[in-house]
Amino acid sequence: MYCCLWASVLLGQDSLVWEQELDLYLAEADALYRKDRRKAMDILRFAESKAKGFKDSLALARIYNNMGHSYRHWGYTYRAAELFRNSYILMKNAGKEESAGFSLIDIGNLYYDLKKYEEARPYYEGAIAIFDPKKEAGARGIETCYNNLALLAEEKGDYSEAEQYFRKALRSREQFQDSFLLAHSYFYLGRLALVQKRGPQAEQFARNSMEHRSGGQWAGRYDLEFLPIAQHYILGEAFHLQRQMDSAEHHFLRSIELAEPYPQLSPYFLKSYYSLGLLFREKGDKKEAEKLWKAALKKSQALSFFDEKELLWKALISLYREEENYAAMAAAYEQLYDLVKRQTPGASESMLRFHAEWRNYNSREKLAQQEQALAQEQKEQRIQWWILSVIACLLVLLAVFVVLLNKKSREVSQKNISLSEQNRTIASKQQIISENAEELRELNETKDLLFSVIAHDLRGPFNSLTGFSKLMQTYIQNNRWQELKTSFQILDESSQQAYWIFENLLGWIQGQTGKLEAENQDIDIRPIVEESLRLLSSMRLLKNLNIYQDYVSAYAKADPYMLRTVLRNLLTNAIKFSSEGGNIYIRSWEEGNLLYIEVEDEGEGMSKEAIRKLFQTQKLQTKSKSVSGLGLILAKQFTECMQGQISIESQEQKGSIFRLSLPLGEQAQVPVPESMQPHKQTAIAPSPATDAQSFMQEHLLQLKNCLAPYLSELNSLTVYEASALRKIVAELQAKTENELALQQWCSLLQQAIYNSDQPLYEQLTTPLYAL
């Protein structure tokens, strides 16, 4: 055909009208530009000269558009952009808006090729604004824009937005039942599913795409050759994802086979080579994988599919590295470097210059449009002036009426505003009264609860003081000096305990009033721990607990009073909830600029919900909290006041760990005295006067007679039912004829109630039921 066209020109036998000639030129150039670049461009330049001779701007626009597609295929991006811009200007000046829209799409595609996705988006969106969806050509343009916007979203990783755009294009194409376009839409959806690793969906979309290959509209189309190559590649990857290796291999080979006559049409045949090589590599056939990748690179030497060739070279490098073939790997790296260096480094800069020129053209065009609009606006303003003069007279009359109406309306509005302000004032005062009432109610609840827990927790120590003072009188009269010595010790501990409860109450009250201030100084924590253990020795010995101490570092910046209170509360908590014969661990170590102190027990432990509620500091939450229960709240307040932190680790039935972190003292690493080296403090058995088991064996019959009226009630109670047990103790202590053994039994029972010590309670009551 090419020879015939040139012969007809040379012989002057122009038997076709110009439009028919132009169609022939463009069709011939479209058939040649992928195979013979020079001949295709000669035909287009000849057609351009004839169009200029006829002064046919529409023909020039079509020719420039065709040239732009050719230059884009050959990799001359900037030249292609200039031609598409010229085509857009000619089409727009001729009033062919839809054709101009397709030129905008072509410019956007150039930016997409350069991976400048944000620059491409405005061109696609501008084209959508131009197309008329009611016309078939406009609908096709919008479908193309939707597909391109979907590709932009896919490149950004927004697969949900990409699928929405693809499906919009698919729904539009289903209205026109064009098999060619439907096949493309299903192909894009299949490729998107492949990117998301959805093998079955990718397979289904690829099969749907292949079902629309029939139809006369396919004849002579470039995609008749391109699309089957891509469809078989998609099917191969889908089967690969589903681990159907034989089917995957078949479709990869089929894609390669279809691309053999036209390797320049599609990069998917290179992708098929790459994926087929991966498949053989997974099977362990590395030689076949290397052979396939080398064959693909050899066939692609004259092609411009840079991304796919880069992927193949990287696959070979990875294979050579795995085989430790460093010479081949070095050669592959050199080839990859040359490939990257040849990837038209000036294309992006050229497109930036084109983008600036394009914006300048649009600015000039907008300026001309603005001048034309301004002239039209001035004409309309003169007409409007006469109309407004007539309307103004009417408005004057209306204004008089409105002024009178507004005067009356303002009077009513002022009254409404005054009423609204009064309502807001009343509502504000009601809100203040409500808030004050709620605050007063909470304060009353806290006061009542505080009084109740004071009465609850102080009764035990003072009962002990009263009971043992009577016992001490009896011991003095009977010259029982050993028991008197033990009673003095218990009396001292009870008074210390009462004083400690008052300290906790005072600390909690200071925390509520915001008057806590720490005076931090460098202190050694070990004497404070020893002092606290000494004060709590009776509680520890009563449960026969073992104490382990390990001090790696022992100096902190802290307030001595506050630290003493915190450690005493933590140790009391550990002793109280430890099982009889259990262990308690005390550790300290340095980490960064902090000293960590840890108290661990093997007791009941706590649930996560209990830990979450443990340090509620705003108010006492329930009536089950005692003053001693304020200890942990106080520990948290004091620790934070010393610029430290407190944390808890706990498991139910396994125990708890309370961990303090305080600023490190200046003498952080000091030699630890031998007496304070990590050691075990074994619990010392309590004296006969405080040993419940031996005490019960010695005085069992005597106690049986005294407690006979209360045995059934004691048998039905547990140590946690403190109110009922205290009532029994109060009745027994009120009897003036009480014997010494009964008074000592009451003191031991009070200790069990105070410490919630069920084992001690059972030691004091169970032998009574056996008689």
Image (spheres, helix red, strand yellow):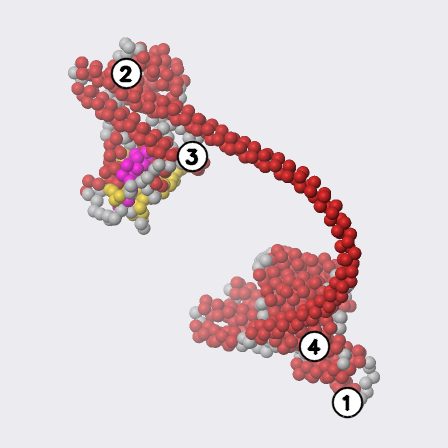
| Amino acid, disc 3 | Gln
653 with respect to 686 (left or right): right
**Residue 662 image position (x, y, % from top left):** 32, 44
Residue 10's label in the rendered image is 1
Circle 3 SS class: loop
Q: Earlier in the sequence, mark 1 or mark 4?
A: 1
**Residue 520 image position (x, y, % from top left):** 29, 43
| C-alpha separation, residue under disc 4 versus residue under disc 2 | 115 Å
Q: Residue extending furthest bottom?
A: 11
Q: Earlier in the sequence, mark 4 or mark 3?
A: 4
Residue 467 position by quadrant: top left
| Amino acid, disc 1 | Leu
Q: Earlier in the sequence, mark 3 or mark 2?
A: 3
Q: Quadrant of the C terminus?
A: top left
Q: Earlier in the sequence, mark 3 or mark 1?
A: 1
Q: Quadrant of the N terminus?
A: bottom right
Residue at the disc numbered 2: 743
Residue located 67% across and 74% down the image: 84
Q: Nearer the viewer, mark 4 or mark 2?
A: 4
Q: Are marks 4 and 3 in contact (CB under 8 Å)?
A: no
Residue at the disc numbered 4: 64
Q: Are marks 1 and 4 in contact (CB under 8 Å)?
A: no
Residue at the disc numbered 3: 618
The number of numbered discs placed on residues in the rendered structure image is 4
Q: Which residues are magenta?
A: 552-570
| Amino acid, disc 4 | Tyr
| C-alpha separation, residue under disc 3 versus residue under disc 2 | 41 Å
Residue located 73% across and 49% down the image: 399
Q: Residues within 10 Å of mark 1 (few under 14, many from 20)?
A: few
Q: Is residue 411 above or below residue 188?
A: above
Residue 292 position by quadrant: bottom right
Q: Are marks 2 and 1 in contact (CB under 8 Å)?
A: no
